[in-house]
């Protein structure tokens, strides 16, 4: 628990260029609504762009209260197609929880192949490097179980010539 905290959604193979979004507060209490948060987008779940910031807002005060906000292109020139979205909570009224019962995104929908080639290549390179490293580790562990600890040896070229 504690601040900041966040909730994230991943749209998988789809990307959305959001023009507006709606949040709905939970229906058990009118308290514990979001007050100060950022609505953010990402294409990898690590690097985030803030699309809209809210400070000391009471827009969601009330049981099941919903509100829709516009994403202004002038305020957010970095708005583009994103596959990940999150609500990054900086402060809540009385709880460490994010008390939401709904989220809606409005805008243009596309498949993720519309992302820049460099972004896709970077993601693929990382996945391949992680996959190769995990396979190498598994092979080394298997060899160690079969033949005992693997000893480091010098290449033949370092040993010099014998004749």
Image (tube, helix red, strand yellow):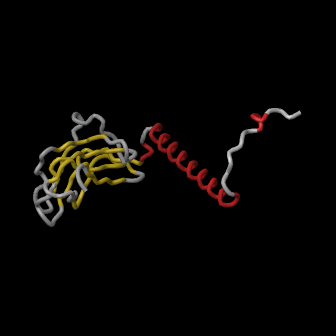
| Nearest the eye: 18 or 65 | 65
Q: Residue at x 27, y 52 (%)?
A: 6
Is 14 placed left or right of 56 in the picture? Answer: right
Residue 24: quarter of image: bottom left
Q: Residue at x 15, y 62 (%)?
A: 64
Residue 21 screen position, x and y as percent: 23, 50
Is 36 placed left or right of 11 in the picture? Answer: left
Residue 19 screen position, x and y as percent: 25, 44
Is 145 placed left or right of 40 in the picture? Answer: right
145 relative to 44, above or below: below
Q: Residue at x 58, y 48 (%)?
A: 132
90 relative to 138, above or below: above
64 relative to 35, above or below: below
Residue 97 screen position, x and y as percent: 22, 58
Residue 23: quarter of image: bottom left
Classify the position of the C terminus by image quarter.
Answer: top right
Residue 92 screen position, x and y as percent: 16, 53
């Amino acid at each position: 628990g504690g601040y900041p905290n966040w909730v994230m959604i991943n749209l998988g193979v789809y990307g959305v260029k959001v023009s507006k979004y709606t949040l709905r507060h939970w229906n058990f209490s009118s308290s514990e609504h979001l007050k100060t948060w950022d609505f953010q987008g990402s294409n990898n779940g690590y690097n985030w762009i803030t699309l809209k910031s809210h400070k000391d807002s009471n827009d969601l005060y009330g049981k099941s209260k919903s509100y829709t906000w516009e994403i202004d292109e002038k305020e957010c020139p970095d708005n583009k197609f994103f596959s990940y979205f999150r609500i990054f909570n900086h402060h809540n009224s009385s709880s460490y929880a994010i008390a939401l019962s709904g989220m809606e995104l409005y805008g243009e929908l596309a498949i993720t192949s519309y992302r820049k080639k460099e972004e896709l290549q970077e993601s693929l390179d990382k996945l391949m490097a992680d996959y190769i490293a995990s396979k190498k580790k598994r092979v080394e562990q298997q060899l160690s179980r079969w033949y005992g600890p693997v000893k480091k040896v010098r290449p033949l070229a370092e040993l010099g010539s014998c004749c």
